[in-house]
Amino acid sequence: RQPRQSGQSRRRRRWRSQSTGARPMMQARGFTLIEVMIALFIAAVMFAIGYGALNQALRDRDGLNASQQRVTEIQRGMRVVAQDLAQIIARPARDIEGAGELQPAVLAAGSDNTLLTFSRAGWSNPAGVQRPAEQRVRYRFIDGALVRHHWLSLDPALNSEPRERVLFTRVKSVEVRFLDPASRTWRTEWPSALATAGPVAPMNVDELLRTRPMAIEFSVVLEDWGRLVRVFEIPT
C-alpha cells in the first residue's frame, strides 16, 4: 500500500509543478511594441479618412446652401422686376431731385447709373396704411448690384429720400431696351431724345409724356450665372 501511495503522490506533485509552471507564461503574454504601433497607425489612418470625409461633407453642404441662397435671390429679384413692369401706368411724376418739373411716366435717359424710372400702381397695402397705391420706382446699377429705389408717393417732397432694396448682387452689367409701338423697333432710351431734352412744364404735358413702350427687355449679366434675359409685355 505504501509504494502505491508514493507513486500517486509523485504523479500529483509532477502535475502541480507542470501546471504552476504554465501559469506565468500565460499571464506574461501581451501586445508587443510593433503590434501597438501598427494598431495606432491603423487608427490614425481611419481617423484621417473619417475627418476628410466629414470635412468634405461640410464643404458640400455649405456650397449647396450658398447655391440655394443664390437661386432664391435671383428668383426673388426677377419676381420683383416682373411685378413692377406689369404695373406700369401712364402717369407722369415730379422730378424730386431737380426743380420739380414733370418727368415722363417711363424714363430712361442713359444718364449716370440710373437705368430706368417709372410710375407703377398696384402697391399692396395689407396693413391699411394711409398712403396711395401708386409709387415712383427707379432702378440703378451701383457697385456691382442692381438696386431698386421707390418713394411713398408719385409726387413726394423735393429731395426726399427713397427706400432702397438690392435686387441682384455680383452683377457685371445691366441693359434695358424698349419696344417702340410706333416704329416696332428696339431703343435704349425712352421716350425719344427730343422729348427728354430740357425740362417739361406741367402745362405742356401731352401724350408723349404718357407714352409707354409695348415691351421692355431686361438683360442682366451675373458673374456666376452669365446673362439672364427677360422680355416683359407692358399693359396698355
Image: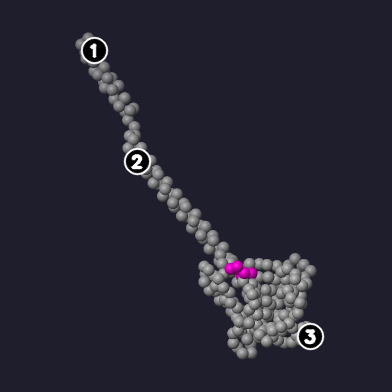
Magenta stretch contains residue 204: no
Disc 3 marks a residue whose amino acid type is Met
Residue 38 visible somewhere in the drawing: yes
Q: Earlier in the sequence, mark 2 or mark 3?
A: 2
Q: Amino acid at mark 1?
A: Gln
**Viewer-side residue, 124 vs 168:** 168
- Callouts 1 and 2 close, C-beta under 8 Å: no
65, above or below 97, in the image: above
**Magenta segment boundaries in residue numbering:** 142-147
- Report the mark closest to the observer, 1 or 3: 3
Residue drawn at x 75%, y 66% is 127
Circle nearer the viewer, 2 or 3: 3
Q: Secondary structure at mark 1?
A: helix
Q: Predominant secondary structure in magenta?
A: strand
Residue receiving disc 1: 5
From where the camera sits, is residue 132 visible?
A: no
Picture coordinates of residue 1, whole percent (x, y): 22, 10
* Mark number, residue 38: 2
Q: Is residue 180 left or right of residue 131?
A: left
The quadrant where residue 197 appears = bottom right
The reply, left or right, for residue 28 in relation to residue 154 is left
Residue 141 percent location from the top left of the image: 62, 71
For the point 41% across and 49% down, the residue is: 49
Measuring from the top left, give residue 41's x and y in whole percent.
37, 43
Please indicate whether residue 75 sits to the left or right of residue 164 in the image: left
Give the distance between the C-alpha atoms of the residues marked 2 and 3, in whole angstroms.
Answer: 95 Å
Query: Vertically, is 213 above or below 97?
Result: below
Which comes sooner in the sequence, label 1 or label 2?
1
**Callout 2 crowding tier (Cα within 10 Å): few <14, some 14–19, many ≥20:** few
Judging by the rendered image, the residue that carries numbered circle 3 is: 203
